[in-house]
Image (cartoon, grey):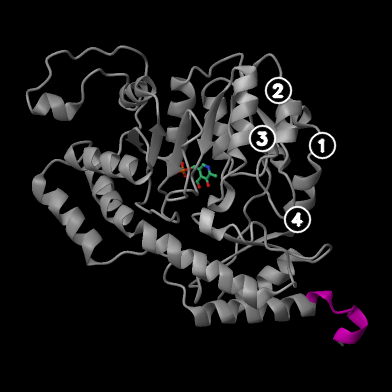
Amino acid sequence: MAWTIPLSDLDYDVREEQAVQAVLASRWLTMGPQTAAFEHAFAAAHAGAHAVAVSSGTAALYLALRSLGVGPGHEVVLPSLTFVATAHAVLQCGAVPVLADVTSIESPLLDPADVARKITPATRALLPVHYGGALCDMPALRSLADAHGLVVVEDAAHAAGTPGVGELSDAACFSFYANKNLAIGEGGMVLTPHGEVAESCRRLRSHGRVVSSHDKALGNASNDDVSEVGVHARLTEMQAALGCVQLEKLPAGNARRRVLRRLYAQLLGHAVTIPLAGTEEHSACHLMVVVLPEGCDRERVRESLGADGIQTSVHYPPIHEFTAFSGDVCERAGTLPVTEELAPRLLTLPLHTRLTDAQVQRVTDRLLEALSEVTRPASSAT
Ligand SMILES: Cc1ncc(COP(=O)(O)O)c(C=O)c1O
């Protein structure tokens, strides 16, 4: 379906084209100077000491967790309300994902009180998710982690450019998937204050090799040892070059997203609940999520908007409701009342830097109409 108002859109122009063409002309296509430049610029933009570019946000989470010692026999606490990749990264380490609740409908972020209840002697890490680009309560989570000797890894897939991201954790992991604020198709980054964690991620992303192919090509490395068993999670130079350009655009892009979210809030009034409203200044504003009124038929609302060419989505069907997690993981999660109340009512509206004010007006007009249609009693609909 060709949406007239898509959920997300690329902020690409001739600069991205030129950056990729320059890589092609250089004839070095993977992990070289562009990757190093992207890492350097990303760390500087986020006040992080070390940045390691990898092939996806999932790979970033896996490599960070593994480099921080998460493995078989460990538990990692994360919200159920996230993309399934957060839990997959824990499972890839051989550890067990322990799903916790979020704080409230207004603040659908990992609840430190439920995290505290889920900590056991096997817990090794906390894995908060900065839903929509707004930071979880990092001071509370850091204190909990310190009190129990745990590491903290931020799932910052939505949070490129969020003020303060990466400052209170052992690693923050970003995604540069095609719909993200910083989009390069596929890609991710580990940001960490620990030099040894960065070094471990660098080795593990390329099969545990101690030198890179680029160093070898330059004649800088004779030692070709593999010091541990790693994975293939390298970024290409084309993606890194796109990343450098997209990083330059990130502050203006995030600022535009903030303006658009505030406009949505103004136009929607009290017809829906807008989670994280008022936090825009402290957020990358990756998503425009609303919570529909209780009992509202979300699929009918989505169909109604879709018929007008407006794309919508749901962030997220919670992990504990997926078939693949219906056994132990679901049982261990227990009840997650806020997540369960939110799950059927969440609706994500279009948000991207090319969205115009007039398009926001059209989406909100259609949503308000759809809401009045679906809540109208059957008798008066004839
Ligand atoms: C919250 C969250 N975590 C992790 C990921 C995984 O990132 P990637 O798709 O780059 O592997 C995503 C991607 O959409 C995400 O939204």
Q: Is residue 324 above or below residue 379?
A: above
- For the residue pair 178 and 196, the one nearer the viewer reads as 196
In the picture of the structure, the residue carrying the numbered disc 1 is 335
- Position in image of residue 376 (x %, y %): 85, 79
Q: Which mark is residue 344?
A: 4
Report the residue at 51% width, 82% height from top: 358
In the picture of the structure, the residue carrying the numbered disc 3 is 324
Disc with the residue nearer the chain's start (1 vs 4): 1
Distance Cα–Cα, label 2 vs label 4: 28 Å
Q: Amino acid at mark 1?
A: Thr
> Which region of the structure is painted magenta?
374-381
Q: Which of labels 1 and 4 is toward the front?
A: 1
Q: In the drawing, does residue 113 fall left or right of residue 309? A: right
Q: Residues within 10 Å of mark 1 (few under 14, many from 20)?
A: some
Q: Quadrant of residue 36?
A: top left
Disc with the residue nearer the chain's start (2 vs 4): 2
Q: Is mark 2 within 8 Å of ligand 1?
A: no
Q: Which mark is residue 119?
A: 2
Disc with the residue nearer the chain's start (1 vs 3): 3
- Position in image of residue 129 (x %, y %): 58, 41
Report the residue at 70% width, 74% height from top: 269
- Position in image of residue 222 (x %, y %): 11, 15
Disc with the residue nearer the chain's start (3 vs 2): 2
Q: In the drawing, does residue 360 fall left or right of residue 225? A: right
Question: Does dot 3 land on a helix, a strand or a loop?
Answer: helix
